[in-house]
Amino acid sequence: MKRIVSVLTVTALLFFNGCAKKTAPADLDTVGGMELKYAEQFAVDYCENGCSVVTIGEDKFLVVPEGTAVPDDTTGMTVIKQPVENIYVAASSAMDLFDGIDKLDEVKMTSTAESGWSLPDIHDAVKSGKIKYIGKYSSPDYESLVADKCGLAIESTMIYHTPEVKEQLESFDIPVLVERSSYETHPLGRMEWIKLYGLLTGDYLSAEQLFTEKTKAFEELSVSDIPEAERKTAAFFYITSSGYVSIRKPGDYVSKMIELAGGRYIFTADDLNIDDNALSTMNIQTETFYDIAHDADILIYNSTIDGELETADQLIEKSSILADFKAVRNGNVWCTGQNMFQQTTGAADMICDLNKVFTGTPTNTELTYLHRLE
């Protein structure tokens, strides 16, 4: 009986494999793929006819170069024809990647208003109208998208909360790419999405070169030989308007940056009653924060919500209990720049900044994304 089942199974596999070979377009036979070092949330296969097949989760996209005929069979794929122009970027983390490869001119629309940008080039482009703010991602100005002949919409996974928006965009024949860089487990995986945007805009070599240059210093760090017990501990946080302490969850990419830089994130899964939602941050009581982080070697204040701090006194004004923290007493409190999260191309530089803080006593002029509170 087992042999009969086995024979039937093999026969079925041969049948389906044969069907697949018959239905797959010959000109989409792959001849290689994009080399990725850290990113795991997308893949690119190169085809014989010059097209590329991009896979993001369950979605597949066929990137067709200018002058190349679209294959007859594109079943299951969204076709993106090059040149890709008049791009609508609703995923704010992607904008800096376009700027990094000098392709900001290809972006014409955004769902983040002028006041929401801390990156100078992008802020100025939105302010001048060079990049048009067309409303929130959940309710964009469809007339502008159609009138400006949008060639590609890049959305974050937030679009899945309003699927009707994605459907409406697609009804106008606008390809919708939902990027998943926030799901990357390695911080540099987020930055490696620059290679995808380089491919889409026809300048993959510039993207690859920038990525290589940016990651060089990080890859030269020697932190793997630092024993866990000898690593300096760090807390990354900010005080909310309601008095809670917002921290990054253990395993989040910021805590991963701290580990890659040679430090040790002070919060562990055992310390916190963590739920299974996808949020990367959580709020805790100041008492809980005190109990866990009181003796942390380093405090890093996240300025992206309520502005940068310059002095330790400004920090203590937010919560008086911080005055008794070891890092405050030792003058080892640092603050991030407001562009830390929007500047996706800076992930490697941020890790290098953290490494300098963990392994030495850098001056503010030596750092890009951190400064010490006086």
Image (cartoon, grey):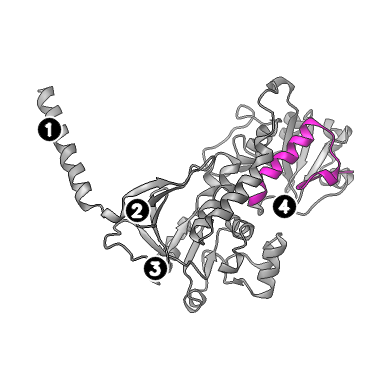
Q: Amino acid at mark 2?
A: Glu
Query: Label 4's element?
Result: loop
Dot in front, 1 or 4: 1
How many residues crowd around disc 1 within 10 Å: few (fewer than 14), some, or many (20 or more)? few
At 67% from the left and 64% from the top, the residue drawn is: 122
Q: Which residue is mark 4?
A: 304
The numbered mark, 2 or 4, whose residue comes first in the sequence reads 2
Asked whether disc 1 touches disc 2, contact meaning CB atoms under 8 Å apart, the reply is: no
Report which quarter residue 68 is drawn in: bottom left
Please name whichever residue, 363 or 22, is drawn nearer the observer in this view of the structure.
22
Q: Label 3 to label 4, Cα distance in Å?
A: 44 Å
User: Circle 1 is placed at which residue position?
Assistant: 8
Q: In x, y percent, where is residue 199?
A: 49, 56
Q: Looking at the image, is mark 1 or mark 4 earlier in the sequence?
A: 1
Number of the label disc, if any, that sits on residue 67: 3
Q: Is residue 367 magenta?
A: yes
- Residue 228 sits in which quadrant? top right
Tell me the amino acid under the disc marked 1.
Leu
The amino acid type found where label 4 is placed reads Thr
The magenta stretch spans which residues?
A: 345-374
Residue indicated by mark 2: 48
- Marks 1 and 4, Cα distance to the nearest angstrom? 60 Å
Mark 2 or mark 4: which is in front? 2
Three-letter residue code for mark 3: Gly
Q: Residues within 10 Å of mark 4 (few under 14, many from 20)?
A: some
- Side of 167 where 219 appears, left or right: right
